[in-house]
């Protein structure tokens, strides 16, 4: 195995050039930005991110699960350059170009299930959610929306109404959309009802019917259930087997549309093109964004043709389906189909096994879950009480950055491992060794 020239930290962090950028940024950018740690990127390649001072980092967060093919895959960059040489914009809502038609056909064909699909292209995940809320309400003539506690669906007002991840994301912005109802997710490690799978017989799904539908909300008033097949921002939570199928069945029985928000879990990240495929579930509407165009801003609403009834002019977007983004998406889909999804499955297994080995030594690891390269590691004070250890995750992420490993938290006390899909054995071993050492060096909390 060839040694890599990363991670390589050569200045205090942030270094002098990064400091200057950060100072200017802090003086002029809006106050709502998060800025996880003082990383000021200069360039990136594959799994490596280099900052403006020449420090090199191993990336295990992919720009929040976006840089699916790495930080500038030559085939994606070539596709974008080729498209840019022809024209930068035309407005796909109003005119035609080949890249948009080709991408729409490609997404419609690759989407799970047997029914014919149609595609609307957006600029982001939240816009895909927003459009799906509109389409679901339009086609069903119903207003109710069900989403899950802990879910993250975006930040525009409609999508935010469905988001229930952190209170700061909603605070001060109300009133949000009416008729949105949040129910318990299939989170077995922290079952809201104190049940244990499989003895629970999916009590949490049955509860939607037995509680919400029987007392509070008539199912014929519900347009859609929005679900992340694997919960992302809320903690990288994998629901138990059969859970998504049970939600699908509930929807079908009541004429409710099932909207799978695969903004984070889609495009090969879990080892399949879309995470719903692990359960053999066909949603009525599937949403994609993040990794779809390797970092170029693009999202998609992929809906069953028979429910795509909104008339011309009912929805649109000036930039959605930008030609450079469409070209990047087509190149990304090629790469995902030609080996990256497979790599995600293989490397994901290796990473998951590695984290399980870490858990034997570090008792602060309470739960490990994941599919492919969407792995959550939940930290606790104590395995018996499962008391969340929130400080540890924050500290681990900061310390890892100082040593050249880019990590990110998810939910209140979990670490998300979501590297680019090009990750290999060397990177997995390096990241695991670093996390192991950092957990070993951990100061008492
Ligand atoms: C599942 C899910 N849906 C929607 C969004 C919103 O996407 P965007 O930030 O592109 O608007 C996100 C972003 O993290 C997400 O993870």
Image (cartoon, helix red, strand yellow):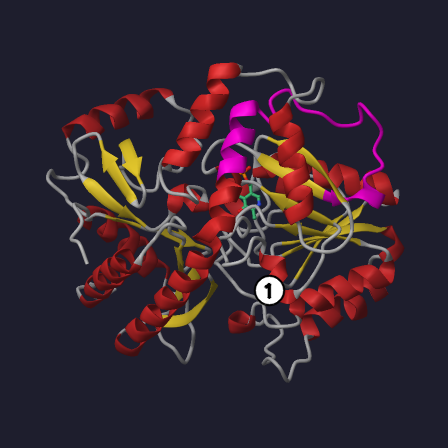
- Residue 72 in percent (x, y) is at 36, 35
Q: Taking 146 as reference, is 395 left or right?
A: left
Is residue 71 positioned above or below 80 on the image?
Answer: below
- Magenta span contains residue 92: no
Write the residue at 53% across / 14% down. Answer: 87
Tell whether 165 sits left or right of 345: right
The quarter of the picture where residue 251 lies is: bottom right
In the picture, the quarter occupied by the N terminus is: bottom left
> Quarter for ligand 1?
top right
Which stretch is magenta?
A: 303-331
Question: What residue sits 51% from the left and 25% below the top?
Answer: 324
Determine crowd level at label 1: few under 14, some 14-19, many 20+ residues with C-alpha closer than 10 A.
some
Q: Which residue is mark 1?
A: 278
Q: Does dot 1 land on a helix, a strand or a loop?
A: helix
Residue 237 is situated, as x and y percent measured from the top left of the image, at 52, 62
Q: Which residue appears farthest toward the bottom when viewing the image? A: 199
Q: Is residue 334 above or below residue 249?
A: above
Membership of 329 in magenta stretch: yes
Task: Give the quarter of the figure containing the C terminus.
Answer: bottom left
Res 33 visible: no
Residue drawn at 66 percent across, 49 percent down = 111
Question: In this rendering, is residue 68 above or below 219?
Answer: above
Q: Is residue 58 left or right of residue 218?
A: left
Instruction: Choose between 389 and 279: the one closer to the eye.
Output: 279
Asked where in the image residue 362 lies, by quadrant, the reply is: bottom left
226 or 67: nearer the viewer? 67
């Amino acid at each position: 195995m060839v040694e890599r020239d990363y991670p390589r930290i050569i200045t205090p962090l942030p270094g002098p050039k990064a400091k200057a950028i950060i100072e200017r940024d802090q003086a002029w950018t809006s106050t709502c930005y998060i800025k996880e740690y003082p990383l000021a990127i200069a360039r990136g390649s594959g799994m490596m991110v280099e900052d403006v001072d020449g420090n090199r980092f191993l990336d295990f967060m992919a720009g929040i699960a976006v840089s699916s093919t790495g930080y500038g895959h030559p085939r994606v960059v070539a596709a974008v350059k080729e498209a840019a040489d022809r024209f930068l914009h035309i407005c796909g809502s109003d005119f035609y170009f080949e890249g948009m038609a080709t991408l729409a056909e490609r997404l419609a064909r690759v989407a799970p299930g047997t029914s014919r699909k149609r595609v609307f292209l957006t600029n982001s995940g939240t816009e895909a959610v927003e459009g799906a809320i509109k389409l679901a309400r339009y086609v069903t003539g119903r207003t109710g929306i069900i989403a899950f506690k802990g879910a993250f669906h975006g930040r525009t007002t409609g999508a935010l109404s469905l988001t229930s991840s952190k209170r700061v994301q909603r605070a001060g912005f109300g009133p949000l959309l009416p008729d949105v109802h949040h129910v318990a997710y299939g989170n077995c490690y922290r079952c809201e009802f104190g049940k244990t799978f499989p003895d629970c017989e999916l009590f949490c799904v049955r509860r939607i019917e037995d509680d919400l539908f029987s007392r509070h909300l008539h199912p014929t008033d519900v347009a859609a259930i929005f679900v992340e097949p694997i919960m992302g921002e809320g903690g990288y939570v994998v629901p138990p087997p059969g859970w998504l199928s049970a939600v699908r069945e509930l929807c079908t029985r009541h004429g409710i549309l099932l909207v799978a928000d695969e903004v984070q879990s889609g495009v090969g990240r879990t080892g399949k093109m879309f995470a719903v495929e692990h359960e053999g579930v066909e949603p009525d509407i599937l949403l994609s964004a993040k990794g779809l165009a390797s970092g170029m801003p693009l999202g998609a609403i992929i809906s069953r043709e028979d429910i795509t009834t909104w008339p011309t002019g009912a929805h649109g977007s000036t930039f959605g389906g930008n030609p450079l983004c469409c070209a990047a998406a087509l190149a990304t889909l090629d790469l995902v189909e030609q080996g990256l999804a497979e790599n995600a499955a293989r490397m994901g297994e290796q990473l998951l096994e590695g984290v399980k080995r870490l858990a034997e030594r570090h008792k602060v690891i309470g739960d490990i879950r994941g599919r492919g390269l969407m792995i959550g590691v939940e930290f606790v004070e104590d395995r018996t009480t499962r008391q969340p250890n929130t400080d540890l995750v924050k500290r681990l992420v900061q310390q890892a950055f100082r040593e050249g490993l880019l990590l990110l938290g998810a939910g209140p006390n979990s670490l998300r491992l979501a590297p680019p899909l090009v990750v290999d054995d060397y990177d997995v071993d390096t990241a695991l060794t670093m996390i192991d050492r950092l957990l070993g060096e951990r100061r008492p909390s």
